[in-house]
Image (cartoon, rainbow, N blue to C red):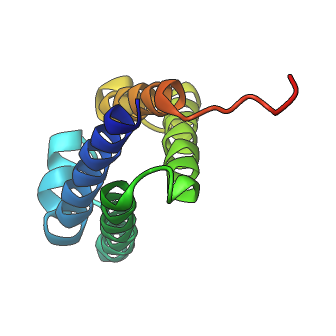
Amino acid sequence: MVKGLKVAMIIWAVIAILVGLAYIFLPGPLSEMGGFEKAPAWVDYVLALLGVCFVATGVFVIIAAAQGPLKNIIWVQFSIVMTVLIAIVAACAIIRGLVTFEQEGPLLIVNAVFAVVFLALYPWRAKSGS
């Protein structure tokens, strides 16, 4: 199970890095692909900042996975929280009508799937004496 968790963390981190790089270097084409209207120039700046966060997160999750998820359990927990929160925010944005499912559905699905995978592979330990 630990090997599966390690692989899942690395896959999710690589996706985060690629998305982050796209936010940094391709904000215009991403907006067009997502069906978003032309946004003000400052939105590209905010996307680049978000991209930096995704790249940094991905790098540290890969490092943690490579060193061993059990040694870096806080990064496993961080990955769980990130995937759950991203899925919740995407779902809420869709429900509120801020975006369509076509625009944010893939983000919701990918992060919901990884949240389930991370939780399923998480090294739960029974308390001693129970």
Relative to 3, is 77 above or below? below
Q: Residue furthest front?
A: 129
Looking at the rendered image, the quarter that the N terminus falls into is: top left
Percent across and percent down for residue 91 are 53, 30
Relative to 101, is 46 above or below? below
In the depicted view, which residue is nearer to us: 115 or 74?
Answer: 74
Percent across and percent down for residue 7 are 27, 40
Looking at the rendered image, the quarter that the C terminus falls into is: top right
- In-image side of 7 versus 57 (left or right): left
- In-image side of 33 versus 108 (left or right): left
- Asked which quadrant contains residue 16, the reply is bottom left
Relative to 124, is 31 above or below? below
Percent across and percent down for residue 62 are 30, 59
Q: Residue furthest right?
A: 129
In the depicted view, which residue is nearer to us: 94 or 119?
Answer: 119
- In-image side of 95 versus 8 (left or right): right
Image point 33% across, 65% down: which residue?
63
Image point 35% across, 54% down: which residue?
65
Relative to 27, is 35 above or below? above
Image point 50% across, 35% down: which residue?
87
- Asked which quadrant contains residue 89, the reply is top right
Percent across and percent down for residue 114 are 40, 32
In the depicted view, which residue is nearer to us: 83 or 130?
Answer: 130
In the depicted view, which residue is nearer to us: 106 or 116?
Answer: 116
Residue 37 visible in the current orientation: no
Residue 28 visible in the current orientation: yes
Image point 80% across, 32% down: which residue?
127
